[in-house]
Amino acid sequence: MRLVSYDEICQGVKRAVIKANTILPDDILAALQLAAEKESSSRGRMFLNIILENAAIAQKEKMALCQDTGMLAAYIKLGQEVKIVGGSLEAAVNAGVRDGYQEGYFRKSIVNDPFIRVNTGDNTPAIIHIRMVEGEHFRITVLPKGAGSENMGQVAMLKPSQGINGAKDFIVQVVETAGANACPPLVVGVGIGGSMDKAADLAKQALMRPINLPHSSPEIAALEKEMLLRINALGIGPQGMGGDTTALGVNINTFPTHIACLPVAVVLGCHCTRRCSIEL
Amino acid sequence: MIVLRAPLMGEDIYRLKSGDQVMVEGTVYAARDAAHKNMVNAIEQGLSLPFDLEGQIIYYVGPCPAPPGKVIGSAGPTTSGRMDAYTPFLIERGLKAMIGKGDRSSEVIAAMKKYGAVYLATVGGAGAYLAERIKKVETIAYPELGPEALLKLELRQFPCIVAIDCQGHNIYDISKGI
């Protein structure tokens, strides 16, 4: 049995929140640099260069990469041999979010109720997902995700007869419908299988995998590659200005499903897809 | 390079073509969802607006708080489409330009053509870069809205692309191959 304290969790989440919002992940940065070299549209190149300059300024000045510092999702992998002491896990995570958004001078974007819409003032509550695993692990990944891209995601409950081609067309259609709104070049997270909610969860979690790391199954990895080519052939380009770079990567996760189901969820991550993991 | 500075006149608007690169200088007003709702409510109740819209520019932004030593935190554009329901009311009353990201509705484009207004796109997700081009910030209304308060900003060399001109030519249609 390993003890982990409320304060350790709170401090860890705070550090992760600040780092995620100010430092772009290496894989995203490398993909943007490559895109800026290859992009054939001059307006697309201009926007990509500003996006790269933005990342440098944010890191140097410790400023938020994007003013939409998002609603924070925290994915916790919790070993079953860990005992949390000094307070509840949920309260510790929310306290870390509150402190991180305060100390980082990040925007507080959460309203208390979908209709009443009063700002909670501290960017809580976070959306917390907990997965129990064996052993004494304690890993937290934070994803502060902005609403511009979040609003453009979709789920489709396809018929099994629509098969892989139906799934492919739906993925491309979601990106096309999103146009410039989701802040391309995108990171496209796709979840296929399970139930409606499982597919959405798979899609969101796909954004946590580095975009230079293909799926472990060669078939799914090939599908990811094919989807990236099709999406980039749309010509939407950086911020919808036209060009070759509509997406930086497509990550797909799959799961067993029901004999009557073919759920497909597409979660769009913007060019500023932020994530940070910490081990406690 | 074309420089735009409010108050904008008819000729400033009519010479702009979709795809032109422009630099916005001087005063713009920052407003997003909740501030737009308040302004349109005020119009419907016959009340005066917090500022005179004639010839002005609205920037769709809800910035981060200013860190020590800075006038504003990260301050990039938000998705303009959420303001579509309100924008024709403001264009009718003299608003000449909007800065944001993403496409606009056919109602907004119709109002832009009728009254002569232009829609500018800047770089979504470049909040730290764009914040460095904002030199002065003043809250002029709705402070209770927090990040959605109505602000008066002074810009310097703020880069934009004319996304939709007052003839309705739309860069998003061109990039989609329409």
Image (spheres, rainbow, N blue to C red):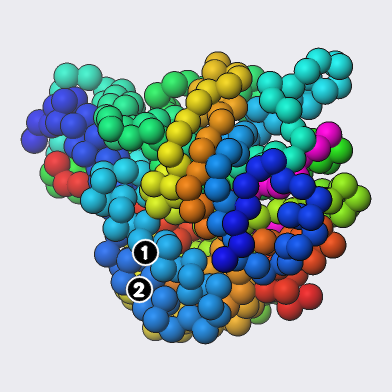
The single residue placed furthest to the right in the displayed view is B114
Picture residue at 52% right of the left edge, 84% below the top: A40
Q: Which comes before the other along the chain, label 2 or label 1? A: 2
B97 inside magenta stretch: yes
The residue tagged with tag 2: helix, strand or loop? helix
Picture residue at 14% right of the left edge, 31% below the top: A8
Give x and y (percent) for residue A269: 48, 57
Callouts 2 and 1 on one subunit: yes
Q: Residues within 10 Å of mark 1 (few under 14, many from 20)?
A: some
CA gap, disc 2 to disc 1?
Answer: 7 Å
Side of A65 relative to A44 (left or right): left
Residue ID for mark 2: A33
Give x and y (percent) for residue A85: 15, 23
Tell me which corner region of the image, top left, top right, bottom left or bottom right, holds residue A236: bottom right
Residue ID for mark 1: A52
The residue segment tinted magenta is: B93-105
Side of A169 relative to B144 (left or right): right
Q: Main secondary structure of the magenta part?
A: loop
* Residue nearest the observer in this picture, B157 or A168: B157
Does residue A140 show up? no
Q: In the rendered image, which quarter contains the N terminus of chain A?
A: top left
Picture residue at 86% right of the left edge, 21% below the top: B44
Q: Chain of mark 1?
A: A
Q: In the rendered image, which quarter contains the C terminus of chain A?
A: top left
A165 inside magenta stretch: no
Side of B175 relative to B77 (left or right): right
The amino acid marked with disc number 2 is Gln
Indicate whether B13 appears above or below A101: below
Does residue A238 show up? yes
